[in-house]
Image (tube, rainbow, N blue to C red):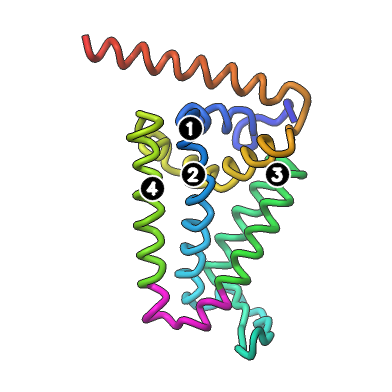
Amino acid sequence: MRNKTGLFDLEKHFAFYGAYHSNPMNIAIHMLFVWPIFFTAILLLDFTPSLFNLPHINFSLFGIHVSLIFNFGFLLALIYAVFYVCLDYKAGTLAALLCGICWIVSSFLATLLGFSLAWKVVLAVQLFCWTGQFIGHGVFEKRAPALLDNLVQAFVMAPFFVLFEALQTFFGYEPCPGFHASVRAKIETEINEWKEKKQKLLH
C-alpha cells in the first residue's frame, strides 16, 4: 500500500480530502449526502444511449421490465469502481460493489419514473444534498469545499472517502498498519498551514 504513488497514492488522496473534512459533523453530513449525489448522477446518465454493441441485460423486478444498458451511467460506475479497487482492493471491492448496485437500482428507477419525472427527482436530490454539504463546510468545517481547489479529485474521492471513514469509524479498518496515523499527521500539517495562510491574509 505504501508503495503506490501518483494517481493511486491512497494516503495522499486521503490527506488532501481529509484536510477539508476534519469536523465530525461535516463528515457525518457527507456520509449522508455524497452517495445520493453519485447515485442520482448515474440515474440521469441512464437515459443516454448504449456506448457498446453489447446486448442489454433484461430482467423483471416487481413486475417491471428493466434493461441494463451499457451507457454513460454504466461507464461512470465502472470508472469509479475500477479506480477504487486500484486504490485499495478490500475497501475498494466494497465500493465497487456499491457502484454496481447504484447502476442496477438507478436503471430500475429510470424505467419506473421515466425521464420527465426522473430529471426532477435528480434535480431535487442534487440541490438538497449539495446544500447540505455546503452548510457542513460553512457552519461546521468553516473551510471551503475541496472541489474549489481540486475539482476532479474531490468528485472522484468523495464516495470512497465517506465509505472509508465509515469502515474506519465503525470497524477500525485501515489498509495497512499505521495508515490512519500517517494520514492524520499529514492532515494536521496541512490544516495548520492553511490556518497560518488565513491569518496572514487577515493581517
Q: Quadrant of the N terminus?
A: top right
Q: Counting other residues with Cα less than 10 Å from the Cα at mark 4, is it few (<14), some (14-19), or many (20 or more)?
A: some
Q: CA distance from mark 3 to mark 2?
A: 23 Å
Q: Counting other residues with Cα less than 10 Å from the Cα at mark 2, is it few (<14), some (14-19), or many (20 or more)?
A: many
Q: Counting other residues with Cα less than 10 Å from the Cα at mark 3, is it few (<14), some (14-19), or many (20 or more)?
A: some
> In this orientation, which residue lies closer to the viewer: 31 or 1?
31
Query: Which residue in the structure is indicated by mark 4?
Result: 132
The tag on residue 86 is: 3
Sequence order check, earlier mark of 1 and 3? 1
- Proximity of marks 2 and 1: CB atoms separated by less than 8 Å: yes
In the image, farthest residue toward the left? 203
Q: Secondary structure at mark 4?
A: helix
Question: What amino acid type should be assigned to the residue bearing mark 3?
Answer: Cys
Sequence order check, earlier mark of 3 and 2? 2
Q: Quadrant of the C terminus?
A: top left
Q: Is residue 183 above or below residue 148?
A: above
Q: Is residue 190 above or below residue 63?
A: above
Marks 3, 2: nearer the viewer: 2
Sequence order check, earlier mark of 2 and 1? 1
Query: Which residue in the structure is indicated by mark 2?
Result: 30
What range is drawn magenta here? 107-119
Q: Counting other residues with Cα less than 10 Å from the Cα at mark 1, is it few (<14), some (14-19), or many (20 or more)?
A: many
**Prevailing secondary structure class for the magenta stretch in the rendered image:** helix
Is residue 169 toward the left or the right of residue 157 in the image?
right
Spot occupied by residue 128 in the image (x, y as percentages of width and height): 37, 56
Sequence order check, earlier mark of 1 and 4? 1
- Proximity of marks 3 and 2: CB atoms separated by less than 8 Å: no
Q: CA distance from mark 2 to mark 4?
A: 8 Å
Marks 1, 3: nearer the viewer: 1
- Proximity of marks 2 and 4: CB atoms separated by less than 8 Å: no
Locate residue 160: give its quadrant: top right
Query: Which residue in the structure is indicated by mark 1?
Result: 21
